[in-house]
Amino acid sequence: MRQRPLLLGSLTVVLAASGFGILGPLARYAYDAGLDPPSFVAWRATFGLLVILAVVGVRLGRGSVGFVNPLGLPAIDRAALVLVGIAGLGLNVAMFFAFDLTTIAIALLAFYTYPAFVAIVGAALGHEPLDAPRIAALGLALGGMVLVVAGGLGSGSTAVTVHPLGVLLGLVAAGWQTVFVTVSRRRYATVPPEQATAYLLAIAAVGAAVLAIATDGALTLPLTSPVALGLAAIGGVVASGIPSLLFLMGIRAIGGTRAGILMLFEPLVGVTLAAALLQEALAPIQVVGGVAILAAALLLQRAAPSGSAERIEPAAVPSVEHG
């Protein structure tokens, strides 16, 4: 019986990773259309918020869940909700500047250390055991991610730029993601995942918009450019709203360590799409990395004993979980 919710939760996280993985190639097109990173993030979060608000409305209308007023939550849960929203905003800001300073693949290599941080923090706090199967899966997934991302560094015509501050900001983003995953696993559990996601996207949209205005970004471009508007809308629906909801649901369902490891599907999807859409061919070493990530996912699924002490929570607590 325990295997079914674990499998469903794992598939939920993989779907979230796939949605987020679309963002890389999509952002490339958005920047070509004239959008700058903070403006694209602001519009993407706004469209994502609209989608999630529609989901909230449907679920409230059906009576499957009730509205949870965040002001009525215990103080620690209110603080956790704000903290996770700030973490999501901090993640975007840190990665934006990291991409500006260093080669994107280098920034991604720094960022995707976060599953290891999540596993270590979870074990230290006593939330999830760092047992042999998890350690093996984490090693496989991180090694595969390195092969997938680093395998493309030598294939381009441009030089690789390694800026210490850019690498540091990638690690800062990993830290914010660790906060997001760890806090989302244990706090504000009475808030339905779609309502929690709406609050988090609202913080990201407002924060990114302020950043775009402060940096004289192209925040108003989608109002006059149908192409930019369309790309932002696709990004908001496919690469923000839906995957953010699925990510939060997955964290609540299978725990932070498993969710963090399975999220390493994101660079695999991004690199594969770049090969298909941007004529960036996959190197053999990247294929090997992809196989390693898939092997890690299989190991996580098969190595879950029925007698494990880890508690798998329902995906939507009030009707009985992001980024």
Image (cartoon, rainbow, N blue to C red):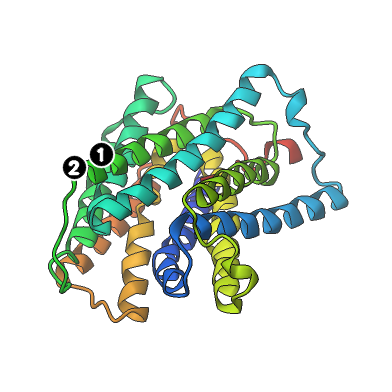
Give x and y (percent) for residue 265.
37, 57
Give x and y (percent) for residue 16.
50, 56
Give the amino acid type for the residue marked by disc 2 in the picture: Pro
Circle 2/circle 1 CB separation < 8 Å: yes
Q: CA distance from mark 2 to mark 1?
A: 6 Å
Q: Residue at x 76, y 50 (%)?
A: 56
- Give the quadrant of residue 284: bottom left
Residue indicated by mark 2 = 164
Give the amino acid type for the residue marked by disc 1 in the picture: Leu
Asked whether the viewer can see residue 260, the reply is yes
* 201 left or right, relative to 165: right
Crowding near the residue tagged with mark 2, few <14, some 14–19, many ≥20 C-alpha atoms within 10 Å: few
Q: Residue at x 29, y 37 (%)?
A: 116
Crowding near the residue tagged with mark 1, few <14, some 14–19, many ≥20 C-alpha atoms within 10 Å: some
Residue 131 - label: none
* 119 left or right, relative to 184: left
Residue indicated by mark 1 = 168
